[in-house]
Amino acid sequence: MSQATANAKVRVMSGNEACAEAAIAAGCRFFAGYPITPSSEIAESLARLLPAIGGKFIQMEDEIAAMGAVIGASLAGAKAMTATSGPGFSLKQENIGFAVMAEVPCVVVDVQRGGPSTGLPTMPSQGDVMQARWGTHGDHPIIALCPRGVRETYDLTVRAFNLAERYRTPVILLMDEIVGHVNEKVSLPDRIQVVERGAPAEPPAEYLPYRVTPSDVPPMASFGTGYRYHVTGLAHDETGFPTNDPHKIEQLIERMHRKIERHLDDIVAVDEDFQSGARLGVFAYGSTARAAARAVREARERGTAVSFVSPTTIWPFPAEAVRRLAESVDRILVAELNRGQLTHEVEWAAAGRAEVTGLWRVNGEPIRPADILDRIEQEAS
Amino acid sequence: MDYERYLRQDKMPLIWCPGCGHGIILKAMLRAIDKLGLSQDEVVMVSGIGCSSRATGYVDFNTLHTTHGRPLAFATGIKLSRPELTVMVVTGDGDATAIGGNHFIHAARRNIDVTVLLYNNWIYGMTGGQASPTTPIGARATTAPFGAVENTFDISALAAAAGASYVARGSVTEPVKLDRYIRQGLQKKGFALIEAFTPCPTSFGRQNKQGTGADMMAWLKEHTVDARRAAKMSPEELQDKLVTGVLVDVDKPEFCEGYSRVIEAARDRVRLPELPETEPLPVDPAERGAMR
Amino acid sequence: MSFHYEIRLSGEGGQGLVLAGKILAEAAAIYDGINATQSQSYGPEARGGASRSEVILSDGDIDFPKAQNLDLLLALTQESCDKYARDLKPGGLLLVDEDAVQNVPEGQFRVWRIPMIRLAREKLGRQIVANMIALGVITQAAGIVSEEAVRNAILARVPKGTEQINIEAFELGVSLAKEMAAQSQA
């Protein structure tokens, strides 16, 4: 070991700091937000970093406005992000729906804290999982990523921007208080992959901002680049103008869903660690997956066979991975810091192939490895 | 001038009712833009929800029809991100001062260089005649069937108090003045509000027995007084009058310019972390590489 | 030999426990190549109120970043001592401020009583550096992170102009720990 000289590649940083730095690395040049615990360090970091790289930071008058400003900046060509926690995430839902409908790429970070309402500002929770899925009204697709640690927060922030640009959609980065605030030893990557905003190949006169394309994602033109078009949250046709024609409405809504559903192999990421002979599977995500990973390791050391599935994409739901797990085990234990929001989803995906049971907690305390280990041994016996 | 150049003619006819004053304001806006020689590619027009906010669908600029009350939030993102663009907001009394009141006062406070054209018809027209923050005391609305009892906002005074650089109030009965106000607002570096009174015969006039659009215009014409003349009138004489004219025209620090100084300071003082090299991935999912 | 060492620093907000934890984690990770995590929990108060900062040091992956079985507990208030002493593992070390913690609970752990707050005030003239004295004691007692690494991490973190007093406080802590260890061996 060196004589205590600094390793320049190694940092001790929090998930919130990693999120802010990754956003810069991914090309984010606009942030609008509103202070809220436990996400404020993301805004505070970007208030310094963004102007230093020629980007823009603004603290808006409220959460609703922050989401609106992010959409405006994205339409003007900037990769844009906002960050909040549960109460602010609720307020942003109206304009998240607009971003879905108008197909405006952006990243929305929710560092989850205990709820409902003002709840537990400084304590962890995974209570916004269903709000991420269905928080805004109407039938809509959504992408939500869920990091388990600091380095993964960095990687998934970059991935969130890439997916947002590629699929012209808001992407939710669903962190939690533990991941946001824990300081961990990380070495950041030397090289990352970045999707840049495309531009239409056709001349402005032929541009249809919402046309059906082979991939179902229409190319996006930024405001002020010569492509004058109309953007609305109303149901619209391929030209972007409002329509009440049932055929055109259906074409829009179906394409919006198809563009995500057709590309699950690109969007859904899940770690599958199957152990042969395992009759029990564990399903966990976010910081709870850290406790689950340790519990699974310790159970295996004690001779109990356990399979472990841990997604980093939670929406669209990794149903295929759950189906594979359900086919290989008798029971699935879902550990989550809520009252079963994804447990029910796992049950639906398992479709009776395995019995699904939950380890839930909503009191502000994290689920600890020992809690999961106890349940593994109970379930396995 | 050639209005057709600025209109999306395939979107006609307008949804606005016969006798509505909105078209007069729309034309004044197009004359102002034409006179300033602004490039259509560099104008972004943002609106909220309501009759007035449908204006963005009819004009050939970069147009954005947002959520109810939020156009100034979206416009703030566009302007701060790309200060070189001319950003206009088209909104109404309900959109801007009820559901969007917070955004309205804060945009004025920041003094961001956005020009707001606010169509004030004292009612929610599109949704069927509900009361707005400017529905006069005693006037009927579908949600004030026995007459409104709430005090009203003086929208221009609100913008002035919140810090706007330019505030003017006009009426569809004085369209040439409206041109000038809009022009001055667009030229002003800072937050500019042009409030324009416009009759709504369908939703306001009918409930308040004010006759046709023409009757309402005649009433407006009679009750409109220019600010300079109003200065010489007594409070009694002004009681039922609507004062128009340029109410604020000052030069003060603008937000995006202020932010450019933040950028200079940050470039001097902030040590950026070492960023990774980037490798491009195709945007089109059809040609995508693995993204993991 | 593989190790997994859990430390909790507890007391009140404003005592610099989060900073001390972060310095220890940075010393371990950046200068000594040891895996480290640091986390904290706190109430709504910006000053005062209960404060707790945890550091986990390991030569393997740290899959769960919160402490569960403490190897070392620092308690700078009676309340924090009462609340957390039970989380110490058998044979763990309870380090208390001798003046602030009058009643030390019974348990299967060693106890070091050191008047860190008083020493900071009397020997260094600044009560606020009690956290650095504690950091010195902990560094020496845990024996995982090198003194030099912690010194480097202190210099990288503390405000300009306060380097000397912080280093002096740290070194005082290291020597106090050496005395305690010698006494307990004797």
Image (cartoon, helix red, strand yellow):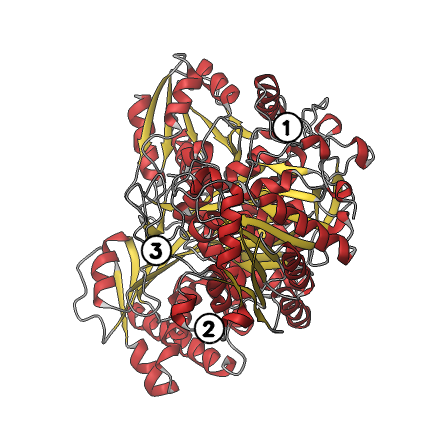
Answer with left or right where residue B250 lies relative to residue B132: right
Residue visible at 41% across and 64% down? C18
Residue closer to the observer: B1 or B34: B1
Residue visible at 28% across and 26% down? A378
Q: CA distance from mark 2 to mark 1?
A: 71 Å
Residue B283 in the image: state x and y as whole percent: 72, 35
> Identity of the amino acid at label 1?
Asp
**Residue under numbered circle 3:** C71
Q: Are marks 3 and 1 on the same chain?
A: no
**Residue under numbered circle 1:** A266
Whether residue C148 appears in this view of the structure is no
Residue C39 in the image: state x and y as whole percent: 41, 55
Residue visible at 27% across and 52% down? C87
Give the label, 3 or 2, closer to the camera: 2
Q: Are marks 2 and 1 on the same chain?
A: no
> Identity of the amino acid at label 3?
Asp
> Identity of the amino acid at label 2?
Met
| CB under 8 Å between discs 2 and 1 | no
Give the label, 3 or 1, closer to the camera: 1
Q: CA distance from mark 3 to mark 1?
A: 44 Å
Q: Is B92 above or below relative to A231?
A: below
Answer with left or right where residue B270 lies relative to residue B244: right
Give the label, 2 or 1, closer to the camera: 2
Tag 1 secondary structure = helix
Q: CA distance from mark 3 to mark 2?
A: 84 Å
Q: State which chain disc 1 sits on.
A: A
Mark number displayed over residue B233:
2
Neighbor class of circle 1 (other Cα within 10 Å; few <14, some 14-19, many 20+) is some
Answer with left or right where residue A251 lies relative to residue A296: right
Whether residue A160 appears in this view of the structure is yes
Q: State which chain disc 3 sits on.
A: C
